[in-house]
Image (cartoon, rainbow, N blue to C red):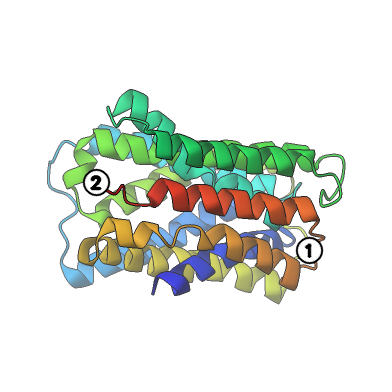
Amino acid sequence: MMVFITLSWGLNQVAIKVANSGYNPILLTVARSLVGGALVFLWCLWRRIPLFERDGTLVSGIIVGALFGFEFALIFAGLDYTTAARGTLMVNTMPFWVLVGAHFLLGERLTVQKTVGVALAFAGVCLVFSDKLSAPGPDGLIGDLMCLVAGMFWAATILVIKRSKLTSASAEKTLLYQLLVSAVILVPFVPLAGPLLRDVSTLATAAFLYQAVFVVAFTYVLWFWLMRVYPASGLSSFAFLTPAFGVLSGWLLLNEPLSVRIWAALLLIAAGILVVNRPVRR
């Protein structure tokens, strides 16, 4: 199941680029959250999962919703400028920003092993930025930076959840906060991304539905279920597969140029994730 999920998330970057060819990227972000949120809400009704009890999560829910919204706005807009492979590597620096943030905000000590993992990932990021052969154009660096900041927003979302009462809320409720709040706060930004419609096609629409229905409403819920059933250490060992699948998907499906530096960056970031998530032997 984890291989299936990480493959789906890796393909998601390709789906975003394809959907962007037909629609305004910020509009896609809003629509994705609304469609996915509606399906998750129906799932909660069917499963009778309580959503409206007063549990003190409203403020933190609004904060994570805003972070989630800006994260995906940056991803969608960033992939207008850079390739799916480069964007995937930038976004998946998230675990390392979580480590740094947890050291200062959650009191989780940054060990030597974790520091080595962060250093490996940082070296991978430097390789991506220094690689001009795989860049789609002079504006590629803009997209890379936007996706890198998106990874930081993703990490901030996780840190807020860990520090708030959302840790005791159901996974579905936390996800709904992110989807619905993000949809509302991003509406004013839609005109900034240009016309609502670009070159609308069946493929672009299918790519959008893949994200909204399959990735958001299905794989996210499946992921939350796995987190409840299996040890977190076992699941985290699969994290390196998402950037790997993302890079390979961009190469195979979009014919994106991949240089030696991109392959080396993938290996460094994947190695960093493995080192960070490796259990410490006592």
Residue 144 appears in the picture as rendered: yes
Q: CA distance from mark 2 to mark 1?
A: 58 Å
Image coordinates for residue 107, horizontal then vertical, percent:
27, 27
Q: Amino acid at mark 1?
A: Asp
Image coordinates for residue 262, horizontal then vertical, percent:
73, 53
Q: Within the image, what quadrant is residue 157 found in?
A: top left
Residue at which label 2 appears = 282
Apparent side of residue 63 relative to residue 201 in the rendered image (left or right): left
Task: Relative to 33, say whether 12 is above or below.
Answer: below
Residue at the far left in the pictured view: 54
Please give the name of the residue rendered at 45% of the width and 57% of the height, measured from the top-left corner. Answer: 34
The residue closer to the viewer here, 193 or 73, is 73
Q: Residues within 10 Å of mark 1 (few under 14, many from 20)?
A: few
Q: Quadrant of the N terminus?
A: bottom left
Task: Relative to 207, say whether 279 is above or below.
Answer: above
Q: Residues within 10 Å of mark 2 (few under 14, many from 20)?
A: few
Residue at which label 1 appears = 199
Disc 2 vs disc 1: Cβ atoms closer than 8 Å?
A: no
Please give the name of the residue rendered at 38% of the width and 47% of the height, measured from the top-left corner. Answer: 178
Q: Amino acid at mark 2?
A: Arg
Please give the name of the residue rendered at 23% of the width and 42% of the height, measured from the top-left corner. Answer: 166
Q: Within the image, what quadrant is residue 109 found in?
A: top left
